[in-house]
């Protein structure tokens, strides 16, 4: 069935839940070209709305998000390939902003949109759980469960069995080629590039271990942040971790990680740290616009840009984690008792 060498942009089996297919049904009456144009504009409008919400709700201006996002190769790939990450970007923006303002039910409903690509749900659900956002957690779980039940009802028992069989096949050696793992920007892609192709069991074990370690460290940061867990650095770390730890995250999914740059820039602007704003912007343009665009012009595939992209995502994860660590250290320093308070009472009285 898969005994062919799949090209970088050759169609592969449909693996998304039926919900995504349902969204595209109205486009069937338009024909391929017009349907593509409408989907293109819909995702572009979603990104524009997300930028407007960020600039309005964070009071950070629209120049930063516009420069970081609109000039990026990931956005170009989203639009060119007709992907859904524009809509997912908007969903993540709404999720983050509503959570910051304490509207947990709205945040949970926004997060449930990620059921279109279930592997992206792991990190956000863990984040909600470890930070004690119970209403958001259960709202998202129930909404996702409702979509899952609807999907199973649509495809029936036979469809469920075939989906399980296909998923197992795609997680094996054949699936590495079919789903273009070399064009991904996650931990899975790093492992597959590092370990020989015939060491499939070792590769899967390494993917599980490294993903678990990354999620564990991120959860530790979020837990230690306490009431600051909805800060911009914490949410930036979440957006990057969501992509990095997803089992299926092709190059265009990098666009969700780029939200982390926008949030870090907004945080730096709120602290009036112009130098950091400039450095983050240059970093973003270098790793997600300039270098990958040059590579794409020469190779015309996502494999080489993905190598640059995964390095950029790993670096961005480190930057976000460092910002959260600094935030934790600052908060602990502010709450630490003064040296006078630590001295014995009789010394203080004598003074």
Image (cartoon, helix red, strand yellow):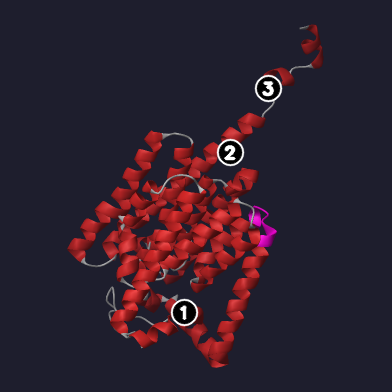
State the separation of the CA atoms marked 3 and 1: 59 Å
Confirm whether the magenta stretch covers residue 132. yes
Circle on res. 338: 3
Q: Nearer the viewer, mark 1 or mark 2?
A: 1
Q: Main secondary structure of the magenta part?
A: helix
Circle on res. 328: 2
Disc on the earlier residue, 3 or 2? 2
Count neighbours of disc 1 (C-alpha within 10 A) and say few if under 14, some if 14 to 19, many if 20 or more. Answer: few
Residue at 52 percent of width and 83 percent of height? 164
Residue at 50 percent of width and 88 percent of height? 162
Closer to the camera in the image, 71 or 228:
71
| Image coordinates for residue 62, horizontal then vertical, percent | 40, 49
Circle on res. 149: none
Residue at label 1?
A: 23
**To which quarter of the image does residue 199 belong?**
bottom left
State the separation of the CA atoms marked 3 and 2: 18 Å
Confirm whether the magenta stretch covers residue 76. no
Q: Which residues are magenta?
A: 129-136
State the separation of the CA atoms marked 1 and 2: 42 Å
| Image coordinates for residue 290, horizontal then vertical, percent | 25, 52
Disc on the earlier residue, 3 or 1? 1
Q: Is residue 43 above or below residue 222?
A: below
Closer to the camera in the image, 28 or 337:
28
Give the position of the C terminus as an image quadrant: top right
Residue at 54 percent of width and 92 percent of height? 158
Q: Secondary structure at mark 2?
A: helix
Residue pushed farthest left?
Answer: 298
Q: Secondary structure at mark 1?
A: helix
Q: Secondary structure at mark 3?
A: loop
Q: Are marks 1 and 2 in contact (CB under 8 Å)?
A: no
Judge whether residue 197 can be spotted in this image.
no
Judge whether residue 108 can be spotted in this image.
yes
């Amino acid at each position: 069935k898969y005994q062919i060498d799949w090209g970088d942009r050759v169609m592969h089996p449909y693996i998304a839940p039926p919900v995504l297919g349902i969204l595209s049904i109205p486009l069937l009456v338009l024909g391929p070209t017009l349907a593509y144009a409408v989907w293109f504009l819909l995702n572009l409008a979603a990104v524009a709305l997300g930028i407007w919400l960020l600039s309005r709700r964070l009071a950070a201006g629209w120049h930063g998000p516009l420069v970081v996002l609109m000039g990026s190769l990931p956005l170009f790939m989203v639009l060119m390939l007709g992907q859904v990450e524009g809509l997912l970007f908007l969903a993540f923006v709404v999720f983050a902003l509503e959570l910051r303002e304490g509207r947990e039910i709205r945040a949970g409903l926004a997060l449930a949109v990620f059921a279109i690509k279930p592997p992206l749900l792991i990190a956000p659900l863990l984040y909600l759980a470890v930070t004690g956002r119970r209403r958001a957690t259960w709202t998202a779980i129930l909404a996702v469960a409702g979509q899952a039940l609807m999907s199973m009802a649509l495809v029936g028992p036979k469809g469920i069995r075939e989906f399980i069989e296909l998923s197992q096949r795609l997680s094996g050696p054949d699936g590495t080629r079919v789903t273009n793992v070399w064009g991904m920007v996650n931990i899975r892609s790093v492992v597959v590039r590092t370990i020989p192709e015939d060491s499939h069991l070792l590769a899967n074990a390494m993917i599980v271990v490294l993903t678990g370690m990354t999620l564990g460290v991120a959860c530790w940061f979020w837990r230690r942040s306490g009431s600051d867990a909805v800060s911009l650095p914490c949410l930036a770390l979440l957006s990057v971790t969501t992509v990095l730890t997803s089992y299926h995250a092709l190059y265009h999914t990098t666009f969700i990680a780029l939200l982390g740059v926008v949030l870090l820039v907004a945080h730096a602007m709120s602290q009036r740290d112009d130098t950091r704003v400039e450095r983050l912007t240059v970093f973003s343009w270098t790793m997600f616009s300039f270098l990958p665009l040059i590579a794409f012009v020469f190779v015309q595939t996502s494999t080489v840009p993905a190598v640059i992209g995964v390095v950029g995502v790993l670096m961005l994860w480190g930057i976000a984690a460092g910002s959260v660590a600094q935030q934790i250290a600052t908060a602990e320093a502010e709450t630490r008792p003064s040296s006078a308070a630590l001295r014995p009472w009789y010394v203080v009285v004598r003074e």
